Structures are given as structure tokens and as C-alpha cells.
Image: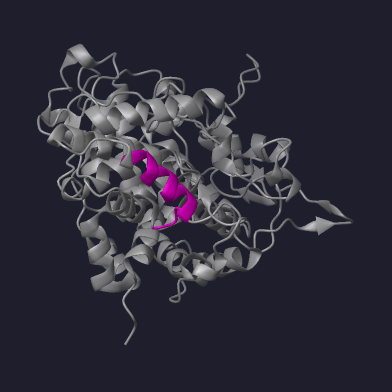
Amino acid sequence: MTQAPTAAAAARFLAQASLGASRAGIAQVQAQGYAGWIDAQLAAPRSGTRWDWLVSKGYNDLSHRNSQAGFDACAWRKLISAPDTLRQRVTLALSEICVVSIDGLVGGGWRSFSAAAYLDLLEDHAFGNYRTLLGAISTSPAMGQYLTFRGNVKQNPATGALPDENYARELMQLFTIGLLRLNDDGTPVMVDGAPRETYGLGDITGLARVFTGWDFDMAGQTATVPDFMRRPMIQIAKRHETGASTFLGSTVPAGLSGADALKSALDIIYAHANVAPFISRQLIQKLVTSNPSPAYVGRIAAVFNNDGRGVKGNLAAVIKALLLDPEARASTYIGPNYGKLREPMLRFIGWARAYNAGSSTDAWNIGNTSDASTRLGQSPLRSPSVFNFYRPGYVPPNSAVSKAGLVAPEFQLTNESSVVGYVNYMQRAVSKGVADVLPDYATLLPLAANGQALVDEINLVLAGGQLGSATVGLIRGAIDTMSAKTEAALYNRIYAALTMVLAAPEYLIQQ
């Protein structure tokens, strides 16, 4: 019989596999085991859509057509309260690989609905097939808006007009194959001591021809309601390039319809050997560790290429494999080169989930938390560019990370302003909540008079027990100087302990 995980091991697992641990979540992992918990999450029903919540709150009224009203609320609501936490974690990861940002959704209005529909689309496919996901995002109104191929027209020699190349370029560079040829383990293919590029300008130009003629499906409705924002885009035949399109050494034949040309093009890209290691490594980075070994990447890429039933791109199988891999689960891998900096959003969500933060009014007025000096420096679907909040290969300059030949992607979000802004924001959130979103510290109040017990509990739930004895001692020492004579004083001890744990280096680095 497999031994049940310890509470600390279960909390560490939940830091990778969910949006945050709680006492109830830890107990569930201990009861079900890692694989059982994953299977239950894979089988869990979806927890409603962001779109339907926006409609239920009246944001589909014409007065909101040209605003972003409601979007932040519907995004935070799912991240903090949805029970299908593995699905939400994978959806968030996919949103940072196949990037759309609400601020770039121009043309057509209804940006909140377009953005919500895109997150709902990613959630629909979070445990599905990556090739199917590529087809869905390639006809998504949000992606068509963001990467500017919605309304794209074929070449016109008379006017000099050429197809927009944005999506063709980013589809290859960011969503599928990357810039460099990769071995199955994610290491670069070297020829005469130099890496090989995966594509060139001619490949972008050739592929861009496929993404002509796509536009909103307005059949039977007008732009006064947002429904067209969740319909897949359709083809406007006269705008579509029907000639042959050549890229990556293959050709989409002439004379195909727009839909058939898209299918053919995506099949060509999907057959590329880079897709499995390129996407697998990024998923490992998002959930587990910034610097997975080539062997780890190779094992997960093998599952991506074949889930055991001959299927390529089965995301459910990929996610399960990467979370159960020895490099994710064995404590012997934990060390100075292991783990990842927790994204500011995940720190905030982890605190909120640990202490059952909720909105009694169902308004979820957290808002846009992008300001690094006063808030988190990061907010759902508000990346500053298609390259996400941070690059998967980012290396902090002149750092120990750089000297060690490692990457630290999330450190691209980190600077003097963001460090101070995060601590100040979390200090306020911990003590007062955020607008109508308030925590429940019922599990901590009975422990608050005992500094050691209080810090140990927070260390376990938030940090998986990974705060060192020196750090625990410093926090406990500070707590012990505080009064414990009244309920208000006990809450002040809770607020202080939480804030210090949330700022501790051993918490900030998820291992």
C-alpha cells in the first residue's frame, strides 16, 4: 500500500498542482494520494463560465460596450473560488503561453466579453488536446483582435497590400515550435557548434497567407450585443488567399477553402518535432520548476508525443505525468537550483484560497492589480505584450542565476518597486481584505496566542513547511513581542505572521 503523503508534502504538491493549499485541500491529497487527487480533478465538472457570470451581472447592457467593466471581477472570481483548482491552474498557465491581453482587444467593443470568452476557451481545452486548442485559438475573436489578423486581407499587387504577419509569427515562435530547433529533451540542436533556427522570414510570409479572410461571425445579430465574441471567426471568401502557401518545408495546396487551409497549416506546424519539448518545458516551468533537467523535459515530451494510446498532445496526460514525475515529487531534488519564484498573482491567490477569502456580494471588486508600485505588478490576462509578463528564458543580469547558467523567468517581474509594492499590498490585503473580498482566519485564531504554533501552521499551509528554522525563529520572535490579551490583539498577531511569511524568501521561492 502506498504511504499517504505527509501534510508538508501534500502542501508542496498543491503549490504545483493547484492555486493554493488549505487545510481541507491538504487533507484531501493525503486521503486520495497524488494520482487520486489528480484523477478527481481531471474528472471534476467545470465550475461555470466567466461569460455567464458577466451576463448574470448585467454587463451585457449596451452601456458597457466600450468598457472593460466586469472582466477583472470574473477572472479573479474563478481563480479564487472555483473548486476545479487544477483546471484553473492549467488555464492560467495556458493564458501565459498562448497570450492574449485585454488591453489589446481593439475593434468590435465588448472587451470584457472577448477576454472572458478567451479564458473560457482555454479552460474548455485545459485537459483536452493541444492540436484542438490550436484550432480554437486560431479562430478565436480575441486572438484575431489581439494579433491583428481579424479582417486580414490577401495580397493586392495593385495597392501593395500584404497579409498581416503577426499571428503567423507568434503562432510559431511562442505557441508551438519556438525560435530554435530542439532535441526531444528540450536542448538546442547544434550544427557545427551553433544552434539551428526553426523558421525564417519566408516561412512567416508563407504562413500569413493562410490567416486571411477571417472575421467576426455576425450572422443573425448586431454589435449591440456581445454574443459574436464567443463565436469562432468565419471566412470572408473574397478576402482569403486561395493560392498555395509554403512554409516549414511544406505546402498548403492552392484552391482550399479558408477553413481547410487553416487545418492543413496547423497540421504542418503540429507535426514539427519541436512542439512536444517546447510546450512541455514551459508547462513544467509554469507548474513545477524553472530549470527542469533535460531528462525531465524528455520524459514529459514523450508523453506529449504519445499518451500511451498513440495520441499526441493529450494535455491531461501531460499534466499528470509532469506532476507525478520523480523530479516533481522527490524531495531529494529540492535545492538551490530547484523550484521557481512564485508569480505575484499566485502568491495572492494562494493566500486567498488558504483562508477562504470570498465576496459576500459576489462582486469580487479586486480590480486590475497591474501596478507594481502599489499592487501586485501582475493581473489576469493583462500581460504587457504577447511575450507574457516574463520570458521563459529570462536570466537576471549580473546575478548568481546568470553565473550558474540557469534561468529565472518570474524574476523579470521583480525590481525594487515591485518588491515593496507587493509587501505593502499584501499587508493591506491580509488585514483588511481587498474591497469586498475578505478572508476567514477561523483556523488561525485558536493558535494566535502561541507564536510558535501560529507560525508553524502558516508555514505549513502557505509554504509547505519550507521556511527554515532561522526564519521561523525570527518571525516567532517578532510575534512574541505583540500583545495577546484581546481578540483584536490576536488578529494583529495573525496579520503580522501572515505578512512576514508571505515576504519570506523561502515562501517566495516555490520548491
Closer to the camera in the image, 89 or 485: 485
The N terminus lies in quadrant: bottom left
Judged from this view, the residue extending furthest toward the right is 192
Q: Could you tell me if residue 468 is visible in this image?
A: no
Using the image, determine if residue 244 lies above or below residue 225: below
**Quarter location, residue 430:** top left
Give coordinates of residue 333: x percent, y percent: 56, 66
The question of residue 476 being in magenta is answered with yes
The boundaries of the magenta stretch are 465-479
354 to the left or right of 404:
left
Give coordinates of residue 147: x percent, y percent: 50, 29
The question of residue 198 being in magenta is answered with no
Image point 35% across, 58% down: which residue? 14
Closer to the camera in the image, 510 or 233: 510
434 to the left or right of 15:
left
Image point 48% across, 49% down: which residue? 506
**Quarter location, residue 489:** top left
Using the image, determine if residue 98 lies above or below residue 295: above
Give coordinates of residue 315: x percent, y percent: 41, 60
Q: Could you tell me if residue 80 is visible in this image?
A: yes
Give coordinates of residue 36: x percent, y percent: 29, 72
Image point 34% across, 83% down: which residue? 2
Query: Number of marks in the image?
Result: 0
What color scheme is it?
one colour
Using the image, determine if residue 159 lies above or below residue 433: above
SS assignment for the magenta stretch, majority:
helix
Closer to the camera in the image, 104 or 8: 8
**Quarter location, residue 60:** top left
Image point 41% across, 21% down: which residue? 103
